[in-house]
Image (spheres, coloured by chain):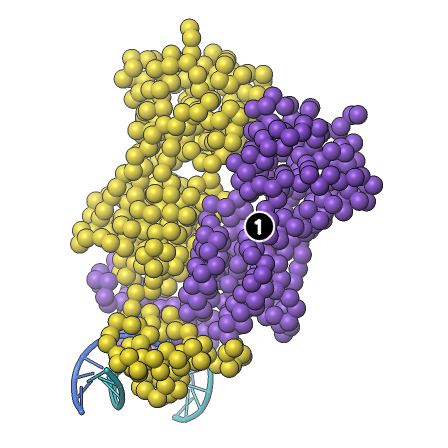
Chain colours: A purple, B yellow, C cyan, D blue
DNA sequence: ATGAAAGCGCTAACAC
DNA sequence: GTGTTAGCGCTTTCAT
């Protein structure tokens, strides 16, 4: 049982040293464990630490110039769909590297994002990982470039995770995944299965992920010599409601689509609901596919065929690369995506 | 654009002071903003800070004795079902109170939990919030009591969130929710709807939440004068597979249950799947209800009737109470739960 | 309203 | 192997 209980007086290394009858430096060496200390002395110090319930002060260490042992994860919102998976990857890798993980959210507000980055600079976080939601592309690049420089100047590393790169030469690590390729593969899969009228539901204007996915959608059509009716690309928010509303709007206009490519799994959930309400059977009448492969995908009815994004691995890579990087200013990886076939898509028999 | 770019030389308050032609103390006062400084002086200092891109060193501040502005959230696993909601509550409240939030996971390993608590003591986190998963009750109480004291001694506050209290007098904040009441209300709802053979699926032995939920299940039966066949309480892990397996086992034995109370929504997902595979219609043939009201619940088919647990509010309360507490050692709240009626339960007509 | 000095707890650099 | 000195960057006295 500790001797003192008031929150005011925590034992310091000096206290330990005094109690063990050695100097503070010796106690420090024992604590760090990276320096030879005579076994008997060592034992005495250890004993004193136990007796006093000594706890090192991480801030004092950090002040001395040591690394802070902290990486920071910055998200739009803690309940976003990939949050858990990416956070898990980040946290696991951070733990594996002996770091603790700070969690911050911005709610999509650029000002708050800047404020958070400022706070993290004060904390000297070793890495600041910005995840998802690439907003307004006009100022995005310069904002990220400014963050990258200011973080570098305070000894931190900016990591853009699932966000576009601000360009070469900017001191940042970029960990992306292949949106275009995944959309291409999925579209090709539908085309190979005989679908020729495929709706893309959930275009969020200005979002980098949307643009890339639609690019893959287009390229697959082109490669398969399939005509693409632009009016099949439907706007819609990245939400259940967005998916349901977009589907309702589409069906009010035309009912000839044999497949729906939802921009995300969440959107797909809305699409499925809207179709069910209209008595459209999936996959018998219409095939529905998604993007992301979040846990929900396999719980939907029918289980969703979708594009797998390696969220957890994104998180791990973000930490790994930020912590062990070479001398080059910038660093960029693109992780692969692939389709996961479940029950929501079937061949279209003409 | 900052003058220096190497990660080695960050400007300090002294640099700012020198550039502004004042003393470090004055610069400090301007930075803190809590002390009168002559407007012209103030302006000069602010200017210097901008020019130098000055960033305060949070560790130096913390070393000086100031609060660290950090709360820590400790979970079993980042992908746990309530993780996102509780984390959101914690993060939001922390942000509202000007704190940053550390995120740690233990993977259910008590040793790692202890290691994490030790790390957080070093960081002087103002609050350490332990969430969910109360394991082996034999040593649990003493472990938590020890954590509470050691954290208190290093100036931190232990918060148990959705975990049982270690008892009165222990310096910890406990934020629970009403498991027994929620289970009671749900069971009563089923009984009121004419169900008399209700299976409880997903008893995890030794888990406090399980015990409390089953207690409510029993009490409702007793209050309604309904006999409770003990063999209807089925063991099973808190997972989709656990729910499916337990349902399969139950149905292999008997098929007379008209309702299934799944221990959690995740378990309910497994139950639904197993019933679907057997051609049992929900809710026409059998009613299924869950516990937690995670987002998944409304995406299941049919949408799940379940017990709502205010996860986000749990997180908020955890932070709020830890930060603003009176002089009493212990502090405990129990947040209410209530049933959410959706489509997976229907009256049973004899 | 501003400044000077001391110290928070730890560790790198240098003695002994 | 162990002790001494100095200093990380900021803030709290205590002057002025």
In this picture, residue D13 sits left or right of residue B340: left
Point 29% across, 68% down: residue: B66
In this picture, residue A14 sits left or right of residue A34: left
In this picture, residue D6 sits left or right of residue A181: left
Q: On what subunit does the disc labeled 1 rest? A: A
Point 60% across, 49% down: residue: A205
Tell me where residue A288 sits by quadrant.
top right
The residue closer to the viewer here, A308 or B127, is A308
**Residue that badge 1 annotates:** A312
Where does the image place residue A242, in percent across and percent down from the top left? Answer: 54, 38
> Where D2 falls versus B241 (above or below)?
below
Quadrant where the N terminus of chain A is found in the figure: bottom left
> Where B156 falls versus B33 (above or below)?
above
- Observer able to see residue A43: no
Farthest right residue? A225
Where does the image place residue B38, in percent across and percent down from the top left? Answer: 26, 81
The residue closer to the viewer here, A347 or A52, is A347
Q: How many marks?
A: 1
Point 23% across, 66% down: residue: A8
- Observer able to see residue A201: yes
Q: Secondary structure at mark 1?
A: helix
Quadrant where the C terminus of chain A is found in the figure: top right
The residue closer to the viewer here, B323 or B13, is B13
The residue closer to the viewer here, B302 or A46, is B302
> Where C9 falls versus A337 (above or below)?
below
Tell me where residue B154 sits by quadrant.
bottom left
């Amino acid at each position: 049982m500790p001797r003192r209980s008031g929150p005011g007086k925590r034992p310091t290394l000096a206290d330990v040293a005094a109690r063990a009858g050695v100097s503070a430096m010796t106690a420090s060496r024992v604590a760090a464990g990276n320096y030879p200390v005579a076994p008997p002395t060592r034992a005495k110090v250890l004993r004193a630490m136990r007796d006093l319930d000594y706890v090192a002060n991480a801030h004092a260490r950090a002040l001395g110039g040591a690394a802070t042992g902290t990486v920071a994860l910055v998200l739009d919102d803690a309940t976003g769909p990939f949050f858990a998976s990416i956070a898990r990857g980040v946290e696991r890798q951070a733990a594996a590297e002996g770091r603790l993980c700070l969690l911050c959210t911005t709610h999509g507000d650029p000002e708050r994002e800047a404020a958070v980055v400022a706070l993290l600079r004060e904390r000297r976080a070793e890495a600041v990982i910005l995840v998802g939601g690439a907003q307004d592309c006009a100022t995005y690049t310069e904002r990220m470039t400014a963050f990258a420089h200011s973080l570098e100047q305070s000894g931190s590393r900016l990591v853009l995770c699932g966000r576009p790169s601000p360009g070469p030469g900017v001191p940042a690590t970029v960990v992306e995944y292949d949106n275009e390729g995944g959309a291409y593969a999925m579209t090709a899969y539908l085309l190979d299965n005989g679908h020729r009228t495929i709706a893309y539901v959930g275009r969020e204007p200005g979002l980098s992920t949307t643009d890339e996915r639609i690019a893959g959608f287009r390229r697959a059509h082109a490669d398969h010599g399939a005509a693409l009716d632009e009016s099949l690309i439907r706007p819609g928010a990245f939400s259940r409601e967005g998916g349901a509303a977009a589907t309702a709007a589409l069906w009010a206009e035309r009912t000839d689509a044999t497949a729906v490519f939802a921009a995300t799994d969440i959107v797909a959930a809305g699409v499925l609901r809207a179709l069910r309400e209209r008595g459209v059977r999936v996959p018998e009448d219409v095939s529905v596919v998604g993007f992301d492969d979040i846990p929900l995908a396999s719980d939907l009815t029918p289980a969703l065929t979708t594009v797998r994004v390696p969220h957890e691995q994104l998180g791990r890579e973000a930490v790994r690369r930020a912590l062990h990087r070479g001398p080059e200013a910038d660093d960029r990886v693109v992780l692969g995506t692939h389709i996961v076939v479940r029950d929501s898509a079937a061949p279209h028999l003409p």
